[in-house]
Amino acid sequence: MTGRSADGDSARALTTVLRGAAAVMVDGQTVTTGDVVIDSATISKADDVAVTGVAADVVDVTGCIVTPGLVNAHHHFLQSAFRTLPGTRFVPMAQWLTTMAGAYAAAHTDPELTGLAASVGLAESLLNGVTTVADHHLTWPAGVDPVAMATATAQAGRTLGARVAFVRGTARDDPQAAADSVSAIVEALLLDNRSGDVGAGVTDDGMLQIAVGPSGVHADGPETFAALAKVAAEYGLRRRTQANEQVDVEIAAQRYGRRPIELLDEWGWLAPDVTIAHLCEVTDDEIALIADSGATATHAPGCDVPMGWGVAPVARLLGRGISVGLGTSGGGSNDAGHLLADARLAMQVSGLVGEPVSATALLAMATAGSAAGLGRSELGHLRVGAAADLCVWDVSDVHDAGVADPVAGLLWASPGRRPRDVMVAGRWVVRDGRLVTADSREFAARLRAALAARVD
Ligand SMILES: [Zn+2]
């Protein structure tokens, strides 16, 4: 197949060939060597396309490992504007929530700030090898148009060339108003960019997904869960929530005399289209309920560990056949959107709560596992036909010298590593460690200036 990509973007190469990789992690089961061929926005077989001649952009990746682009299954972009806030370190979750909410209000959170925080969070994500991010947005100030809030985040994704799953979250919102705003967001951002029944609430080009997500049983009652489930079913949107963090377990017990997962079950929120983030302090009975329902999970140790919420028993979840993805959660607890670093942390702490989880299993979680929770079978792997989202990791320097297993070394060696190059949908977005779709320092400066102007 030749010809320009469907949108006629002439900046996008027809065919890109990555030549000479030390290893190619195709998926969690398969590591190969040889060329990676990208035809337009899709991974192709080498013999399917003419890989020689002027049409091919041949990139030397000797000394590098190629992996699928990482998929961050749980982020809160707005918190990127509120990192290391005084009063948010080593405090109980209830106090943390109050302090964060106060900060959002003091900064007069609106579409402008939301867009700036999303731009910073997305630029940081791409520079860290994350090509798709689920942004669970929970802050909807009175009098601010929800569509404008969602549009600001969607636009940041378009500008940067990152895939965004925008999750219309709730935290003590009016149930019907929240559901109505989901309809308005879908009508404004999705339906014009979708032909037919694409499924999972994704635009035709795969760059924007809309989902719904109550914050959790600690913040929202059954009416909110029901209203969001109804509107999700109407449009075919995925559902996401959080459960079994510290306060969540306490409030479920005090208010309802139940475990959080029992409540989600009673409220119709254990189903294959639901993904549940955090899952610290989860009991064997709760794990069984999740497994039987087909719901998926997201592990977020980069938030849960520093917050003192515990470590989700990943090996037990996986052992029961539950699909588990990986997320960072937001800057108010994690302070970084570095999913690979969190995969390393997850690996290191996994043995504290059960069987250790291997580097390969963690990489599979951070790619295909997260994609499964979004209902996106084209993401998170490099098999033929996959979306051309990938990372090139340079393992030729001293940080990786002496490493026997280069793929395991991605996690065990060189903490905080960043990719040399990153591609999303066949388009290079990071080259030689720098963002090419925008000026990342400008985003940082604009966010700093906006915060300085807003906060006394
Ligand atoms: Zn979270």
Image (tube, rainbow, N blue to C red):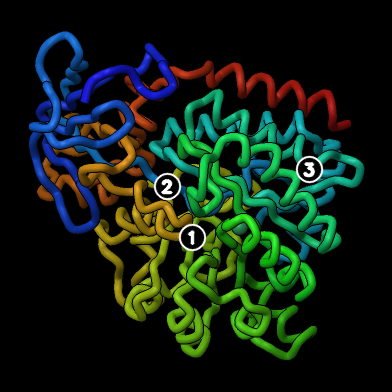
Q: Position of residue 184 (x, y in %)?
A: 75, 45
User: What separation in Å lies between label 1 and label 2 (alpha carbons)?
Assistant: 15 Å
Looking at the rendered structure, the kind of residue marked 1 is Pro
Quadrant occupied by the N terminus: top left
Instruction: Assess whether mark 2 and mark 3 are in contact (beta carbons under 8 angstroms).
Output: no
Q: Earlier in the sequence, mark 1 or mark 2?
A: 2
* Quadrant of the rendered image containing residue 149: top right
Measure the C-alpha gap from mark 3 to mark 2. 25 Å
Q: Which residue is mark 2?
A: 71
Residue pointed to by mark 1: 301
Marks 1 and 3, how far apart at CA: 30 Å
Q: Residue furthest top?
A: 54
Asked if residue 1 is positioned above or below residue 331 in the image, the reply reads above
Q: Nearer the viewer, mark 1 or mark 3?
A: 3
Check disc 3 and give the amino acid type: Pro
- Residue pictured at 62% horizontal, 55% vertical: 235
x and y percentages locating residue 411 in the rendered image: 29, 49
Instruction: Tell me if 22 is positioned left or right of 200 in this view.
Output: left
Residue at 77%, 33% (x, y): give it: 111
Instruction: For residue 382, say whether it is visible.
Output: yes
Nearer-N-terminus badge (3/2): 2
User: Residue 113 versus residue 269: which sits nearer the camera?
Assistant: 269
Which residue appears at 10% of the width and 28% of the height? 20
Q: Secondary structure at mark 2?
A: strand
Image quadrant where one finds the C terminus? top right
Instruction: Name the amino acid type tagged 2.
Output: Val
Q: Residue at x 55, y 62 (%)?
A: 304
Residue position for label 3: 146
Q: Position of residue 218 (x, y in %)?
A: 74, 72
Residue 68 relative to residue 138: left or right: left
On screen, residue 210 above or below 391: below
